[in-house]
Amino acid sequence: CVAMCVRDPLAGVGGMNHFLLPEGSGAGTDAGRRYGAYPMELLINDMLKAGARRDRLEAKLFGGGRMFDSLRDVGRSNADFAEKFLRDEGIPVVGGSLRGDGGRRLHYWPVTGRALQRAVTDVVAPKPVPVMAPVDTGALELF
């Protein structure tokens, strides 16, 4: 997955999107929402409607890490797609963190352009310790 953070620093308008796959051949609008171009174009168009100007847009890209040991590195494909998309659109990438291993948790403040990322580890939470039921002593209580 890749997250794209875009803003117009003068207009104070910005936003963030996230996509799962760079391109695909799904059918219908719902399938198209999973692929990179659709959410990226939607975000940029919504920002322009809110007062941003295309010539002032700047972006930060995060993600694209290798999540699984498989033959196809989808994270790298996502990162390559996002960089090419922004280059083709003439939007400079001013920061971020792409590729590598593992996932990231991201917070983004579009007005200031500040982004905070944390590595997401695959550490498994400890299993809860079972609570032992009280031992039945066979006593009878009358009331």
Image (cartoon, rainbow, N blue to C red):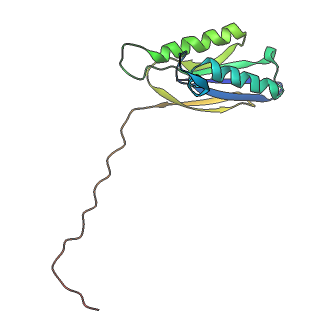
Q: Quarter of the image containing the C terminus?
A: bottom left
Where is residue 44? Give x, y as percent.
73, 22
Question: Is residue 9 something one can see in this rendering?
Answer: no
126 in relation to 4, above or below: below
Q: Residue, x 37% and y 35% (percent of image)?
A: 123
In the depicted view, which residue is nearer to us: 17 or 133? 17
* Residue sitting farthest toward the bottom: 143
Residue visible at 51% across and 29% down in the picture:
104
Determine whether, in the image, residue 77 is placed left or right of residue 61.
Answer: left
Residue 53 is left or right of residue 141, and the answer is right
38 displayed left or right of 119: right
Task: Examine the rendered structure and indicate whether residue 88 appears above or below residue 65.
Answer: above
In the visual, does 127 lie left or right of 67? left
- Residue farthest left in this picture: 138
Q: Residue furthest front?
A: 27
Question: Count the marks: how many?
Answer: 0
Classify 127 as above or below 81.
below
Name the image quarter holding residue 134: bottom left
Q: Is residue 120 visible?
A: yes
The part of the image, by quadrant, that contains residue 61 is top right
Q: Residue at x 23, y 87 (%)?
A: 141
Going 59% across and 26% down the picture, which residue do you hit?
18
